Image (cartoon, rainbow, N blue to C red):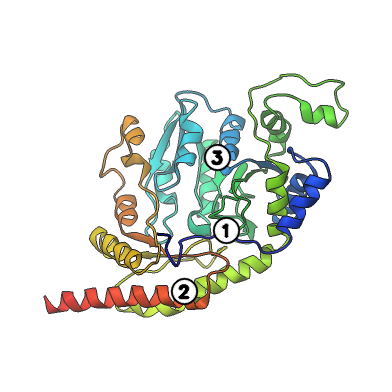
């Protein structure tokens, strides 16, 4: 049976379906029509990004970024192990070794103080992941990259419409990658974008995105025919996806306010549990503006996490844990990593629970989630004291 309160639910906020109909009646539903271009231009303008290229997914954007950075077999890219597999796959698929570094215990972001210790003569780039829409310590990361002549690729899959010291996530490194998957803040089912902040990479990025051809230059009248000039793939999204997404991006501030309300509701009602030492709530540094992508709890142990998930499921509420650390996965172990290599990552990933969080989550349903979390943790605390 489906849960009464799901973890996520896709939503329509405005004119999404109307814009899809417009795209169809306008006679173009393949990529790079009116809506694909409008989405890109809106983000370039609002987030001060040199060039945005829409992609079928954030995975595609990450793969393009790896190609643009001229990564070669035997190179290394520093990244957290606590991330979605696409971060590592983008480089591993071309023979590059993911150099996993531990995360910070407060934000669960890449620990910037451990980066220099992981740099070798094979390191070519740093790939920070902005977890939960909270920015990594980008000033420090950028300084390290400049010192060692490394490129920075921001995995901002969860970071659309969030910022670090007033700068949009995705606009800080040479390259940034966004996701519009149905679990993100702004959605179109599957979708992404490559943010290009280094002007020298724009022309080649267009070629890579168009299957390695100079098709974009042809349509601008810069060449009389287009041909295969570089490696690439089909990294252009459907116009239907972009039409849906445009309807969401138009209402990005409204959607952001709604997510903030949901986040603050959880924060307010669950704060007493943190004060009692029963759970830890998320942290947002003062110099970061979050987009309120998720709300999570850190339980005292793996056992407590498992019991809470089971309790909520029994009550018809779907909460989930998040990433299994990549360095402990079978492919991670093929790169020579072992359990125990990244203790903070392993500890926090075992204890984290993500609560239901979506645009039209009602206050009544949210209060039920809070009540069941409180009931479970209070009973657990009572049993512990009795023992």
Which of the image's four quarters has the N terminus?
bottom left
Which of disc 1 and disc 2 is earlier in sequence?
A: 1
- In space, the residues marked 2 and 3 are separated at their CA atoms by 31 Å
Of tags 1 and 3, the one toward the viewer is 1
Task: Name the disc covering residue 111, or none.
Answer: none
Disc 3: CA contacts within 10 A as few (<14), some (14-19) or many (>=20): many
Task: Name the disc covering residue 10, or none.
Answer: 1
Residue at image point 42% right, 36% down: 119
Looking at this rendering, what residue extends furthest in the front direction? 1
Task: Name the disc covering residue 366, or none.
Answer: 2
- Residue corresponding to mark 3: 59
Residue at image point 76% right, 25% down: 214
Instruction: Indicate left or right for 375 with 29 as reference.
Output: left
Of tags 2 and 3, the one toward the viewer is 2
Q: Is residue 32 above or below residue 387?
A: above
Most foreground residue, 106 or 245: 245
Query: In the figure, residue 381 lies in which quadrant?
Result: bottom left
Would residue 124 be visible to someone looking at this image?
Answer: no
- In space, the residues marked 2 and 1 are separated at their CA atoms by 17 Å
SS for dot 1? loop
Residue at image point 33% right, 56% down: 348
Residue 360, image x and y in percent?
Answer: 57, 68
Residue 344, image x and y in percent?
Answer: 32, 53
């Amino acid at each position: 049976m489906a849960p009464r309160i799901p973890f996520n639910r896709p939503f329509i906020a405005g004119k999404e379906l109307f814009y899809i109909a417009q795209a169809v009646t306008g006679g173009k539903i393949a990529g790079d029509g009116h809506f694909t271009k409008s989405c890109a231009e809106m983000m370039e303008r609002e987030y001060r990004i040199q060039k945005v290229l829409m992609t079928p997914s954030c995975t595609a954007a990450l793969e393009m970024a790896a190609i643009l950075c001229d990564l070669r077999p035997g190179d290394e890219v520093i990244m957290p192990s606590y991330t979605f597999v696409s971060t590592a796959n983008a480089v591993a698929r071309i023979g590059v070794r993911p150099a996993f570094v531990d995360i910070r215990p407060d934000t669960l972001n890449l620990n910037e103080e451990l980066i220099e210790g992981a740099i070798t003569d094979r390191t070519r780039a740093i790939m920070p992941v902005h977890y939960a829409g909270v920015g990594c310590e980008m000033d420090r990361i950028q300084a390290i990259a400049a010192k060692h002549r490394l490129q920075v690729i921001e995995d901002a899959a969860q970071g659309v419409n969030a910022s670090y010291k007033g700068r949009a996530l995705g606009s800080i490194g040479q390259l940034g990658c966004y996701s519009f998957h149905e679990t993100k803040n702004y959605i179109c089912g599957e979708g992404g974008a490559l943010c290009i902040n280094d002007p020298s990479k724009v022309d080649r990025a267009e070629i890579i995105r168009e299957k390695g051809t100079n098709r974009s230059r042809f349509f601008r009248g810069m060449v009389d025919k287009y041909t295969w000039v570089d490696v690439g793939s089909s990294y252009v999204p459907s116009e239907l996806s972009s039409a849906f997404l445009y309807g969401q991006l138009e209402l990005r501030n409204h959607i952001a306010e709604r997510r903030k309300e949901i986040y603050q509701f959880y924060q307010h009602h669950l704060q007493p549990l943190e004060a009692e030492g029963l759970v830890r709530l998320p942290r947002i540094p003062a110099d970061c503006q979050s987009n309120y992508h998720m709300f999570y709890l850190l339980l005292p142990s793996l056992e407590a996490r498992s019991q809470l998930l089971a309790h909520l499921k029994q009550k018809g509420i779907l909460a989930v844990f998040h990433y299994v650390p990549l360095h402990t996965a079978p492919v991670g172990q093929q790169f020579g990593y072992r359990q125990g290599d990244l203790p903070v990552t392993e500890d926090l990933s075992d204890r984290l629970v993500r609560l239901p969080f979506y645009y039209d989550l009602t206050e009544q349903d949210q209060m039920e989630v809070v009540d069941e979390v409180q009931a479970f943790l209070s009973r657990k605390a009572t049993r512990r004291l009795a023992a």
